[in-house]
Image: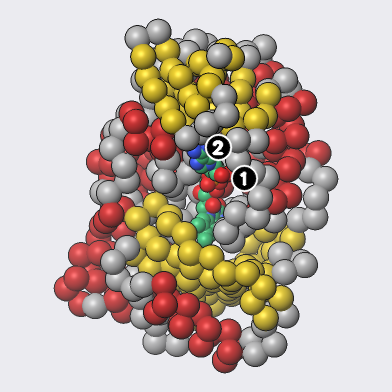
Amino acid sequence: MRNSDITIVGAGPAGAVLAAGCAAAGMRVLLFDHRAPWEKPCGGMLGPGAFEEFDYFTAYPHPVYFSTALRCTGPRSNESIRPSERPFPVLSRQDLGEYLIDRAVRCGARFVSERIVRLDRGKTGWSLSTGESTYAASLVAGADGVRSMVRASVATPIPRPHRSLCCGYTVQGARPEHPLIRCEDLRGYLWLFDRGTHQSAGILSRMGDLGVTALLARLDDFLAREHPSARAVSRYAALIPSVCDPAFFDLPCAGDDWLLLGDAAVHVDPLTGEGIRYALAGARCAAGSLIDDNPRSYDESWRAAFGDLLRAKASHLARMDALAEAFGTEMYDALLYSHFAGDGA
Ligand SMILES: Cc1cc2nc3c(=O)[nH]c(=O)nc-3n(C[C@H](O)[C@H](O)[C@H](O)COP(=O)(O)OP(=O)(O)OC[C@H]3O[C@@H](n4cnc5c(N)ncnc54)[C@H](O)[C@@H]3O)c2cc1C
């Protein structure tokens, strides 16, 4: 059995940044992921100013597609181009993963390209198995995404009303002038983002509203009408957290020997589904708490960093749900459109 001070399950943005922070402070870190770095189904859009917020992006070696405006369309032919004073980056998840995992390894973390298939919590610590080998850890961090196995062993899984279904394609041949968000006729939205060498096209809807076939049919229809030269090169379906009750963020994300971060902690914008920035910010908070040898303080630090924002957005989503229930999806879409267009909550 191999030992570590901290074992991190999942090497997406959350896990890789946590690994780098802890390893740089001299902790023995094991970082597991059977797939990463990979082109995770994701728009890859970070908000304005994201690169400035995290200093490690100054050395980012991969291509980044910067946009200076967002095109939004909504019900009743509403349409706007929302300019941004600071460009917002759109990047490939494969590139981001390579960069953050390399950085973690350079800081001293050990990256193991294997899947954790079993997790046991005993009186003296954790035991994690990949099927091939078993590892001991005094603390386990769950950065293993929306279907987190670590979350399932320390907290309740994400309930169905707090999830959305999204599906889409990596596309070639569709070159929107600006990243596009379209809020129409569903509790969710459709997007098309250019990433230089390819585009990310997707559609998301609250769980239980529409299935994969219906969602893809709408996306196909949109692409055929607005981007007839678009060619889908790969297809995906995925879940995304969309918390519609602010009290959900009162649940703890840390104990004496565990913590959750990123999607596993449901640190995702309830309205838009954006989570990369929260994954990076949460990992910074988690690393600080672990370096201080006080894992429970992580709950205070992530709440201080972005808890109020997530709560406010969850409240807004609850109001939008109530309006959709009473008046249909048009009201929901109008509010979501306002949010993206910059004149909403
Ligand atoms: C279709 C789609 C579009 C999105 N678009 C955007 C966007 O444009 N902008 C934005 O900010 N956010 C977007 N998001 C959300 C964003 O992808 C996530 O919030 C972000 O990736 C969370 O990072 P993470 O590190 O917590 O988890 P992830 O990036 O999901 O990484 C989790 C990792 O854990 C690994 N893993 C899982 N189980 C195990 C196991 N048992 N053993 C070992 N490894 C394991 C997985 O292989 C994975 O690499 C989108 C999400 C989806 C689904």
Ligand 1 within 8 Å, label 1 CB:
yes
Give the residue at x 34% y 73%: 210
Query: Which amino acid does the dot numbered 1 rest on?
Result: Arg
Residue contact between numbered discs 2 and 1, judged by CB atoms under 8 Å: yes
Please give left or right for residue 137 compared with residue 44 in the image: left
- Corner quadrant of residue 206: bottom left
Residue at far top of view = 124
In the displayed structure, 144 sits above or below 93; it is above
Q: Secondary structure at mark 2?
A: loop
- Comparing 47 with 229, the one in front is 229
Ligand 1 within 8 Å, label 2 CB:
yes
Q: Position of residue 132 (x, y in %)?
A: 57, 29
Please give left or right for residue 207 compared with residue 148 in the image: left
Query: Which amino acid does the dot numbered 2 rest on?
Result: Arg
Q: Is residue 9 visible?
A: no
Q: Position of residue 101 (x, y in %)?
A: 70, 36
Q: Position of residue 90 (x, y in %)?
A: 67, 58
Give the residue at x 65% y 30%: 112
Q: CA distance from mark 2 to mark 1?
A: 8 Å
